[in-house]
Amino acid sequence: MTVAGKNTAAARRSDAARKSRREQLLDEAARELNSKGISMTSLTAVADKLGFSRASLYYYVEDREDLMFQVYLRSSEIMARRLGEAAQSAASVLQVVGNFLSLTLDPREPELAALSEIGLLDQAARETVLGVFEAVVARLASLLEAGARAGDIRQCDFAIAARTIISIIHSIPLNSPLALALRVTRRDIIAAAKDILANGWAADRAAEVNPPPIDFGPLLTPPGGLFDRVAQFEAKREKILAAASQLFNRRGADTTSLDDIAAAVGATKRTLYHYVGDKPTILSACYARTHRIFSFIREQAAAQGGTAADTLIAVLRANSISHQRDDIEPLRSSTGYDSLSDEEKILATERGRVLVQAYRALCREAHSERSMRDVNRDCLLLFLRGAGSWLAKGLVRGDDQRRAQIAAQIAELLRVGLRPL
């Protein structure tokens, strides 16, 4: 960080002692929303941590939804300011990106809330938050484009690159349990993010890696014939779980009702009970379905042969495409986790561990075959999970060709970084 950037950060920390009560409330609420979601965030618990009385709490917020709106808006505004500071204190676009990462991921600074449940806000509030957020995306994309014109970075889809960078930033607090399990510090994460977003993980950045796309057909249960009752049952059940996963991703699990899911598939609650069960059962089934989707992708990518780099790129692209398809969309990582039973939490944790170990082995194999350079592979695992998580918000949609383009751009950003090839 430059002297100017250090001075700015130091001034912010000096002001922290004089933070208003409202800022303290929103800081704590951002941490709660990231770790638990709005449905599990107790206003009383937040107030107790800060020594607020009930009356003083409601002086600042009307209810939980208002709290979420204020937190999301403030986090987007903070991100906008930090991007402005990063741009002022850097001589090149790569330095801007590096400073932006340092400022937004600094553990001494207020935690930014990911817009994980923005679908719960009413239209006016959602448009207000997204107006600020999309302005940050547009400015970062514009800076990247200017950097490409100056020859500082390679040509790419600048808007997708900007969204992916911001997605990685937002995902780090959400993935703090994984970071703890991997034993990587925030300092490790910042250094690795700067390195990989600038240089990528590829040992040979000029090499072309373009594996065949994964065929999702076997994942989708065919409707079957008129008398194939089992196939018809499974097709209907799959449609319900896909719709539920999408709603959970946009609105959170506990704040999505059975009525919401039934309306999304044009059915009744009785139909949901018949094909899946009650809401806890639906959530559990969505977790199992997500594991099945990601396991299928990994197995299909490995079955195609090729190098470990080919397999890794095939997996990354397919994962990103899956989040863009309404008929496949898996549950976003950790969505509704706190609502699971203790037994289901253990099962979900074990499934996650299996996938992490599989990706870790794949990265180790890529390094052994010398297609992956020396990078912090544990931090890379965090970025692999977070780079495409923005797709689950449903902010960008397109046809098959556009989905493939977006997936390729996300994978390439991690593989070769932003530097010119």
Image (cartoon, grey):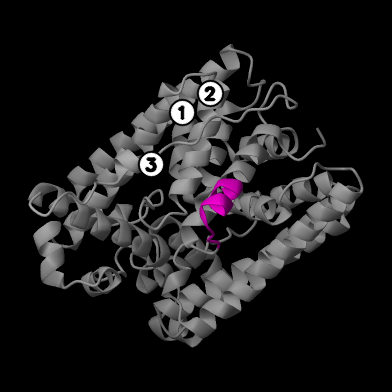
Marks 3, 1: nearer the viewer = 3
Is 397 within the magenta? yes
Report the amino acid beneath label 3.
Answer: Phe
Q: Percent x, y for residue 183?
A: 50, 31
Does 169 sit above or below residue 19? above
**Real-space CA distance between mark 3 and mark 1, rounded to the nearest whole angstrom:** 20 Å
Q: Is residue 186 above or below residue 274?
A: above
Q: CA distance from mark 2 to mark 1?
A: 6 Å
Task: State if disc 1 and disc 2 touch (CB < 8 Å).
Answer: yes
Q: Secondary structure at mark 3?
A: loop
**Residue holding disc 2:** 363
Residue 32: x percent and y percent? 44, 61
Q: Residues within 10 Å of mark 3 (few under 14, many from 20)?
A: some
Question: Which quadrant would the N terminus be assigned to in this image?
Answer: top right
Q: Which residues are magenta?
A: 396-406
Query: Judging from the image, what secondary structure is the residue with disc 1 in?
Result: helix
Q: Residue at coordinates 80% horizontally, 32% vertically from top-left?
A: 421
Mark 1 neighbour density, 10 Å: few (under 14) some (14–19) many (20 or more): many
**Marker disc for residue 406:** none
Q: Residue visible at 63% across and 19% down?
A: 371
Residue placed under numbered mark 3 in the picture: 216
Residue type indicated by callout 2: Cys
Expressed as whole percent of the image width and height from the top left, the position of residue 222 reads 24, 47
**Is 330 placed left or right of 345 in the picture?**
right
In the image, 413 versus 216, the foreground residue is 216
**Residue visible at 30% across and 70% down?**
264
Tag 1 residue: 359
Give how far across and how far down residue 19 sits, in percent. Answer: 64, 71
Q: Is residue 32 left or right of residue 78?
A: left
Q: Main secondary structure of the magenta part?
A: helix
